[in-house]
Amino acid sequence: MAPGRMTATQFLPAVEQPRGVAVQRSALAGLIAPSADVPVLGMFQRLEAQPGVVQRKETGAAGGDIHHAAAQGVAGDGGALPHAAAIQRSFGAHDVSGIQAHTGGAAQHASRAIGAQAYAMGNHVAFAGAPDLHTAAHEAAHVVQQRAGVQLKGGVGEAGDRYEQHADAVADKVVAGHSAEALLDQMAGTPVGAGVQRKEVGSDAEITGPQDWTTADRTGNTPRWQAACLRNLNAVDSSQYVKVVERRDFYHWFYEYTASLGYQTRWALAAYVVANGAHQIADMDDSALNAVANDTFGLANVELQGAMREGNQVIFDNVLPKLKRLLDGGPLRGRAALAWDKQVLAEEQTLIQPLYSRLSQQSLDQLNRIARKQGVVVGGGAWVTGQDKVDAGPYNNAGRVPGFNQPNMTSINDRWTYGMNLGNQFTPGGTGFNPATDPMPGVGAGYQNGTEFAQVDTRHALHELDAWLNPNRLSRTGAGSDLQAIIGQLSPFEKQQVLTDHSADGWAYSTQFAQFSFITEAQVRQALPADAAAAGAVSAFIGRYNTEKARIPPYTPPIMMP
């Protein structure tokens, strides 16, 4: 287990990469948000043009222009996928018969416009010319990925990302005449949207590759857990970490790993401390006392629990590429390390400011009490469980985590100062941080105007729904959000995640919905996609829901159902 357990009384929501409607193009270096006026766009993945064939230039074109060009290239009906027979033999159960290929003038023009040999969008693929077997198989693999719900930051794929590597590996097998079915299974997951699948597994038999680990691996800090963390960091694959506690322990691994290499950066140490507090409020799966304090005593309502999940996720998704660049750049020490910590923490706290802006006053009051350790139950819960203490580690001091001691919880600068002080407190010899002489640095416009936040804030309502349905909420009483209101806020992407029937916490949505006597089938259907393509999966989901409803004794909350 990570060295020391920290308190639920901390905040600074610490930090999974956005999934959702996306445009995947391997050659684009930047992130381009989906265009609001091209609703047909799902994901857009492109095969980078070979040098000398189509060279991409940084034109500064707007995201909407790129999406529009891509949509024009696959407008209307397409033809059969080239090399379909050979591809289908290798793809096995993954059907390619419905893929529509576009090879005419519009597709060629669109491919040239975005600097691509080919690209995939939903069930459509476009080619700049007659494709060879490898290119056609590569794009067909992207279609399978998109059916599963790939995770693309900002909706745009990039050269060398895990989906491009996967598509290339699939195409290699097709060209060699080998089966690619198992490889596709790893990416496709469930038939309808892999979405937010639980990545941590319970047994060795469920391990599918070097990216995986068991719960025992994580809690025991085993070599397999450490190797998986390094692999996922190098792949910049935040999708493997779907629970607060998993991200918390990743931060702990990263801190100790980099410290062992001579790095003196301490952001990950502070993030670990803070993520433990978020875990206790959001997950509540390691101590019944947390559930009693947060739920029964109304110390953390559903909105706040959802915000803890959300803050943890968006920070993790945003910071993981920075951690990779830090590792690649070699050890930072002294003032250089402190400068890195200051900058990353300033960006983190600016990133999550929109979360504070949309919290109700009730939730802000609850957060303020928890963060400052105010009240008998808040303080007592931490003291009894020992979760407000950090045990000594090879690269950190032992000590009790202080309550938030700055004037204003909603102030970016005050939260930043608190976080910097945390790193200083738990670092042997300190970090050299002095709030009197070390002001918070400025951050880029993308952090100030919310652009960076929008790229990672892909599941706001889903986090709140998960908090509402969390089986660790003992009585499910206390002030909070109304279920119907949460369902009404679900985006089409979030509804696809519900349809997978597999929450980030590992439980089934159909089972949790079925527990409550007052949740109707009509409400459940509102939480699911309404498009015709999902009708079969929706019917199966409703079937499971009704089966569970007949099996599980109905739960009627005694009072104040949030």
Image (cartoon, helix red, strand yellow):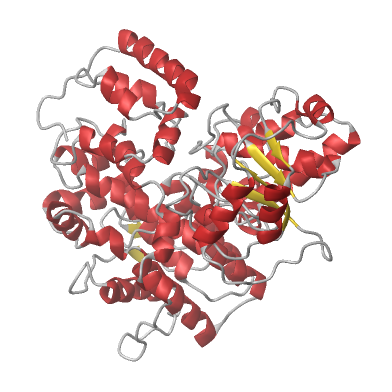
Instruction: Provide residue 99's location: percent of width, then percent of height.
Output: 67, 32
Q: Which one is in front, 557 or 21?
A: 21
* Left or right: residue 503 compared with residue 88: left
Residue extending farthest bottom: 437
Q: Residue at x 66, y 47 (%)?
A: 163
Q: Which one is in front, 152 or 224?
A: 152
Instruction: Provide residue 318's location: percent of width, then percent of height.
Output: 48, 61
Q: Residue at x 71, y 59 (%)?
A: 112
Evaluate whether residue 136 shows in this view.
yes
Instruction: Provide residue 257's location: percent of width, then percent of height.
Output: 60, 63
Q: Which one is in front, 123 or 525?
A: 123
Q: Is residue 244 above or below residue 114?
A: above
Q: Is residue 292 above or below residue 29?
A: above
* Left or right: residue 117 compared with residue 338: right
Which of the image's four quarters has the C terminus?
Answer: top left
Residue extending farthest front: 105
Evaluate whether residue 15 shows in this view.
no
Residue extending farthest left: 559
* Left or right: residue 355 compared with residue 510: left
Q: Residue at x 34, y 43 (%)?
A: 463
Q: Quadrant of residue 199?
A: top right
